[in-house]
Every structure is written in C-alpha cells, then in structure tokens.
Amino acid sequence: MNGRPPGLAPYAARDQASRGRRHPEPPPAHRGEFQRDRDRIIHSTAFRRLEYKTQVFVNHEGDLFRTRLTHSIEVAQIGRSVARALGLNEDLTEAIALAHDLGHTPFGHSGQDALNRCMQPWGGFEHNLQSLRVVDLLEEKYAEFPGLNLTFETREGILKHCAVKQARALGEVGERFLRRGQPSLEAQLANLADEIAYNNHDVDDGLRYGLISVDQLRDIRLFADQYDEVCRRYPDLPQRRRIHETIRRMINHVVVQLIEHSRRLLAEAGVTHIDEVRACDRPLIDYDPETRAQTLELKRFLREHLYNHYRVRRMSRKAVQVVEALFGALTDDTRLLPPQYQDKLAGADAAGRARVVADYVAGMTDRYAIREYRRLFDPLELT
Ligand code: MG
C-alpha cells in the first residue's frame, strides 16, 4: 500500500511525500501537513477579511448575498465532496479552496482590473499572484518566517495561472507554466469547484436581487433541465423554494458528472503517482464535453445578463473610482500611508513603493476602502 493512508488513491497528494515548505519546519505532532496549511489559512488576517469582500455585488448591498468568505467555504465543501469520492486528499483540496481568493482586491473583478491598470508601469497586479504573495510574504503571524510558510502543494494549487515572465521569477512553484505541466489533482479540482460554486451562487444571488429572471434562465439547459423537473415533481412549491431546489440539483448534477468523467479520465491515463499527474499534457479532473458545453452556456449567460447588468456596472464604476483614487493619492504621497506600511518603504524604488501601495489597497475590504476614500477625499470627514 505504499504507506498510503486508507481512502487515498495512489495518484492523490500525500503529506509524507510533500515537497515541503520554503522554511523547513518539524512535522506537526497530531495533524497532517495539509491540515496545518488549512489551519494557518483559517487563522490568517486575509481570510477574515474575505467576509467583507465581494465578487459581483458590493458587500453592504444586502445581507443575503455571498461574500468571498462564504464563496470560499462553498468551494471547500464542493471540493471535499469530490475529493472524497475520487480518493483525493481532502485536506489539501480544502486548504487550496480556502486560500484561493485571499489576494482579491475589494469590489471583485472591477477592483482587480482597476488596480492592475494602476500597476501597469510596475509589473501589473494579478489576484492569483497576490494570493500567493499573501501566504508567502504579507501575513505577519509567525516568529520564524514571513507569511504562512505553506507546503509546496498548497502554493502550487493557489497559483492557478501565471504568465511565463512571472513564472520564471517564482522558482519551483512557477515551473509547471514553463514546461506546460499540470498541478496536483487536488489543485485541478479546487479550480473547478470554484467555478461550480460561483456559477450557481451567482444564479441564486442574481435572481434574489432581481437582475436576472427565471424566464431568461429557462433558455439555459443546466437550469432548465432541473427547473422543469422540480416543477413536474412539486407543482405547488412556492417560487423561492423552487429556485433553491433547482440550484441544489444543478450543483449536484454538475458534481456527479464531474466525478464520473474524472474517474474515466484517471482510468484511461492510468496514473499511479502525483508526478505522473504533473507530467500530463491535460487536466484529469474535468467535465465531459456535454457538461462543459452547458457550463459555458451558463457562464456566457451570466456574463451578458448579470456581470454586465447596468446596475452591476454602476457599482463597478464606483469601485474603479475608489481604487484609482486611493492608489493615485497614496503613490503621489506615501506619507499618507498608515505607519506600518511606511515601514515597508525603506530602501524601496518607485516600483517597490507602488507595490507596497498595491498591497495596502488590495488588502482592503469593500467598506474599509470606501471609508478610506472618504477620509482622504471628503473635506468634511474626520480622519
Ligand atoms: Mg473564487
């Protein structure tokens, strides 16, 4: 059995075979290496801030919408279910899922795009790389090392995509982007669990907010198949419950398809070790072509009708204004930064100073960014 813990398939990541941490540490006494990673992520400052960061909506728009925190927990839930079904490492899947959004700016994608534009002269800003920067450098929790000092496997999973130029600068964790390899199956899974979670909760939030309608969604196969079945089985169900039952079934349908197709892919590839997984030229955790086509159809719908809805765009416009104004003022005069950020400026050139400002802005929650904007630009606001 290779010393493999029960339930783990031969191609799963194993604590004992981890490529280790950047700063060597003795093994944990009563938990696994990936459990320790997961625990460190949960205790991080960046993780707590996810509660007040959003993906599509601005955090204070309503109490019922998903935040990045509840999103990350849903990703972890879906990831763990699939991991267990496929014999993958649940702890590693969970650690990657909980950390995958740590580097996001306030205000979702519009905030990230705005900060990326601001940072163009200094190498840009990418939330994926920023998540890695948070766990490698920015968290200040431990006496012996900066960051959280996570295992290679968790860091590999956090780095979902990466340009070749940046991959070179990242060392071991960037290598797969240079040789076009794959990450662990757990990383592949966390990536798809992310997509399954947001596609479905954005349908739920979009309907609740009245930005999209059931009538529109009946043209989308993933939704329509389940909705029609729910209507047939429960003709008298109130609409809100009908929608929830539909979304529950949509998640279940996609998850079951994903498990079954991935099982086929794994059997066909005949992989027996994580290194063989990494050497593959394509992912082995994947949807079948039909489910992929249906997922793409739903994503296109959401892009057109939800993410580009005029009310969402209006919020996004404000988000861009807040991020650009904060970045501009703080790079013009870094003495406006809080003291703990000014301490990081010592010896920094222009690029280094801009990066400190980007780290500060990226770490803000939605409401902190708005408050900071008022403090800096509203003459009547006390600082
Ligand atoms: Mg996500």
Image (cartoon, rainbow, N blue to C red):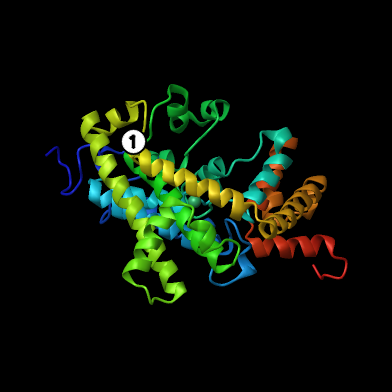
Query: Which quarter of the figure is the N terminus placed in?
Result: top left
Residue 50, how many percent across, how many down?
Answer: 54, 60
- Name which quarter of the figure residue 224 lies in: bottom left
The residue at the point 74 percent across, 57 percent down is: 318
Residue 259 as seen in the image, left or right of residue 210 = left
Residue lying farthest to the left in this orientation: 1
The residue at the point 34 percent across, 43 percent down is: 186
Q: Nearer the viewer, residue 329 or 217?
A: 217
64 relative to 38, above or below: below
User: Callout 1: few (<14), some (14-19), or many (20+) C-alpha neighbours within 10 Å?
Assistant: few
Callout 1: helix, strand or loop?
A: loop
Residue 192 as seen in the image, left or right of residue 132 = left
Q: Nearer the viewer, residue 209 or 180?
A: 209
Q: Which residue is mark 1?
A: 19
In the image, what residue type sits under mark 1? Arg
Q: Is residue 10 visible?
A: yes
Residue 287, how many percent across, how many down?
Answer: 35, 41
Residue lying farthest to the top in this orientation: 179
Residue 13, how many percent across, how many down?
Answer: 28, 41
- Name which quarter of the figure residue 185 lies in: top left
Query: Which quarter of the figure is the C terminus placed in?
Result: bottom right
The residue at the point 42 percent across, 60 percent down is: 73
37 relative to 266, above or below: below
Residue 80, how many percent across, how many down?
Answer: 32, 54
